[in-house]
């Protein structure tokens, strides 16, 4: 089964098969760590979220994009995320 790709301003996204919501939410954070293990449920976020493998089109840098429904969740994630 082919993976659906999503193109948004500046990024090509590949949805994680573990996403409950395959939606690109308004609050987005690109992480330049393509191999970091990100367990979003462990962050105890209040709203919906999704995780994508991502390619930043401006420089073809690979990484991951986390998107959040609520801005508070983005702030919570930023304060707790530590790359491997």
Image: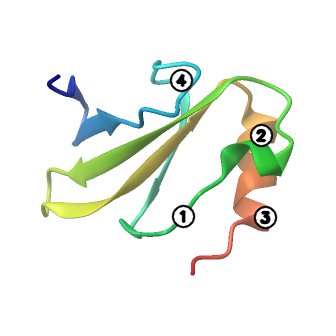
Number of marks drawn? 4
From mark 3 to mark 4, how far is it between C-alphas? 19 Å
Left or right side of 76 for 28: left
Left or right side of 56 for 19: right
Sooner in the amino-acid sequence: mark 3 or mark 4: 4
Sooner in the amino-acid sequence: mark 1 or mark 4: 4
**Depth-wise, is mark 3 or mark 1 nearer the camera?**
1
Badge 2 element: helix
Residue 79 quadrant: bottom right
Q: Which mark, residue 19?
A: none
**Is 74 located above or below residue 84 in the figure?**
above
Q: Which residue is mark 2?
A: 73
Badge 3 element: helix
Left or right side of 33 for 46: right
Q: Which mark, residue 37?
A: 1
Q: Residue furthest front?
A: 1
Q: Which residue is mark 4?
A: 25
Sooner in the amino-acid sequence: mark 1 or mark 2: 1
Q: Which mark, residue 79?
A: 3
**Depth-wise, is mark 1 or mark 2 nearer the camera?**
1
Residue at point 28%, 37% (across, down): 13
From mark 1 to mark 4, how far is it between C-alphas? 20 Å
Sooner in the amino-acid sequence: mark 2 or mark 4: 4
From mark 2 to mark 4, how far is it between C-alphas? 12 Å
Q: Position of residue 35 (x, y in %)?
A: 39, 69
Q: Position of residue 84 (x, y in %)?
A: 57, 81
From mark 2 to mark 3, how far is it between C-alphas? 10 Å
Residue density around tag 3, few if under 14, some if 14–19, many if 20 or more, within 10 Å:
few
Residue at point 14%, 25% (across, down): 2
Sooner in the amino-acid sequence: mark 3 or mark 1: 1
Badge 4 element: loop
């Amino acid at each position: 089964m082919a993976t659906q790709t999503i193109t948004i301003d500046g990024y090509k996204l590949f949805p994680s098969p573990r996403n409950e919501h395959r939606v690109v939410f308004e609050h987005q954070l690109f992480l330049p760590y393509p191999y970091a293990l990100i367990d979003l449920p462990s962050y105890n976020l209040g709203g919906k979220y999704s995780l994508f493998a991502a390619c930043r089109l401006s420089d073809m840098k690979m990484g991951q994009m986390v998107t959040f429904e609520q801005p508070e969740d983005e702030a919570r994630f930023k304060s707790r995320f530590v790359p491997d």
